[in-house]
Image (cartoon, rainbow, N blue to C red):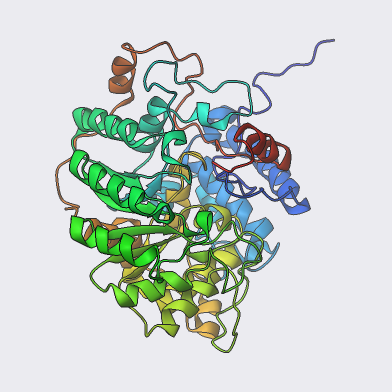
Amino acid sequence: MASRKSEPQDSFDSPVAFAPCSNGEYCPPSLTAADARAERLWRELVEDKHKRVGMSRRQFAQSACGTATALFVINQVYGCGGNDSSRVGTDDAGYRIDAGAMEDAAQACEALGGDEFVLDVQTHSAAPRPPWMEPDVCRPTNESQSCIGPLRFIKEVFVASDTDVAVLSGVPSVREQDPLRIEARDEIRRIVDRMGGPRLLLHANVRPNEGQVALDFMEIDAKQFPIKAWKVYPSDGNWRLDEDVYGAPFLSKARALGVKVVAAHRGIADDQNRYTDFSSPRDLAGAAKQFPDIAFLCYHSGWDGKVAEDHPFDPSEANPRGIDRLIKAVLDHGSVSNVYAELGSTWRNLMTRPEEAAHALGKLLKYLGPDKILWGTDALFTGSPQEQIVAFRAFQIPEAMREKHGYPALCAETKRKILGLNAAKVYGIDPAEKRDAITDDEVAQWKLAMADDPASVPLPAQKSYGPKTRREFFAMMRHQGGRHV
């Protein structure tokens, strides 16, 4: 007798992924017993709740109640209070989700919804060369970049999420091998502008260790494109922002060109994750002291997946690791006011570890302040930005942790600052500027001028495009010639 299966097994995957993912710059961690337990609990709850609310499994999974259920599961399995249902929905839970939100759509929407201005300072796309000549599809290969072309980027960032403005950033690559060269990035910006008004900002990648060549390209890019910031990867060439050979000439050139925002990759991929490593934020804070008129954005906030963020900052630690490196760097240089902590990949990987997320955000709020944290998602490598946005809206630093460690509350005003208002000041953006909504129909109409997209999926896609396993990561590395994307 054939088995009855009204829906595919994966048709009701959790709208908030339980397992961390990689943006392509590090090997993703292996699945844990807790991850498997979360998946089982999610499916058990879906089986129960979808019948109660009169939805199919897929409809429930894609609803606000489904998202509330996923956060409920995170509280239960990974939460600060452990597997204790009495803590769910109280001040001791990472996510303020009451059990009733799993069946009450109005209650779920109240917990997950918001009208904040959202400015995502770290997003990524890719394009075939030459741009716009191949279908924007996900091919059944390990070539993750083929999944995040312009169409999918526009749909997931501006249609499927609450993102109002985004920054399209680069990756650590030599100029001629960049999977999305500055010319292609600018073309995406023009398309977005035609659809819904100005809302996509551009980074220009710079490799200061290339000397005068890099400075010349900075001048060319600044003249030809509306560059809002420079993106650098000091760890990629083992140079430092606070030294005279490459750092000072680069920063002086940025100042002379009038583009005085520097986004520096700091954390994730390094040697031993020490305070003295090339990916440590130590030199970023030093450069901020030397160039007080330049805003320094510490991408990833010094976070590293190999380090558990399950502790408060210890001022006596001489060689801190992870996010503590950024805090020490800022304090060591006199609490410089032009350093900002960015959350791309950091929040995505910590949001299923509520205790670590609470420590990470609590430390940044305590030592850098609510005005110095910027929202970034590292989408589309990490998937749709929306799951990160709704999770952040519902997140809180538990009262017990605030009392014990002196962490500020993650209140509504602070969330508004982090989600967009802080970055708006850095980039000179008016949050109140009128921006027309971009619809899926508009994207579909524009797509008619391109090849058909057989991999089109319902929005949001709820998947990540970076490698999710060690096998996928090393396959990607082989494809990239031994380099991360």
Total labels: the figure holds: 0
Residue found at the very far front of the displayed protein: 212
* Quadrant occupied by the N terminus: top right
* Picture quadrant where residue 127 is located: top left
Picture residue at 71% right of the left edge, 62% below the top:
83
- Horizontally, is 252 left or right of 374 in the view? left
Residue 114 shows up from this direction: no
Q: Can residue 400 be seen in this view?
A: yes
Image quarter of residue 439: top left
Q: Which of 485 and 311 is in front in this view?
A: 485
The residue sitting at 50% across, 49% down in the picture is: 101
Q: Where is residue 358 in the image (x, y as percent from the top left)?
A: 53, 68
Give residue 346's position: percent from left, percent from top.
Answer: 52, 57
Q: In this view, does 53 lie to the left or right of 339?
A: right
Toward which corner of the image does residue 88 lie, by quadrant? bottom right
Image quarter where the C terminus lies is: top right
> Which percent across, then down, holds residue 180?
41, 34
Q: In x, y percent, where is residue 136? A: 45, 21
- Examine the rendered structure and indicate whether residue 195 appears above or below residue 70: above
Q: Residue visible at 45% across and 48% down?
A: 108
Say left or right for 44 vs 152.
right
Residue at the bottom extreme of this rendering: 316
52 or 101, which lies in front? 101
In front here: 101 or 233? 233
**Which of the two residues, 148 or 40, is positioned nearer the viewer here?**
148
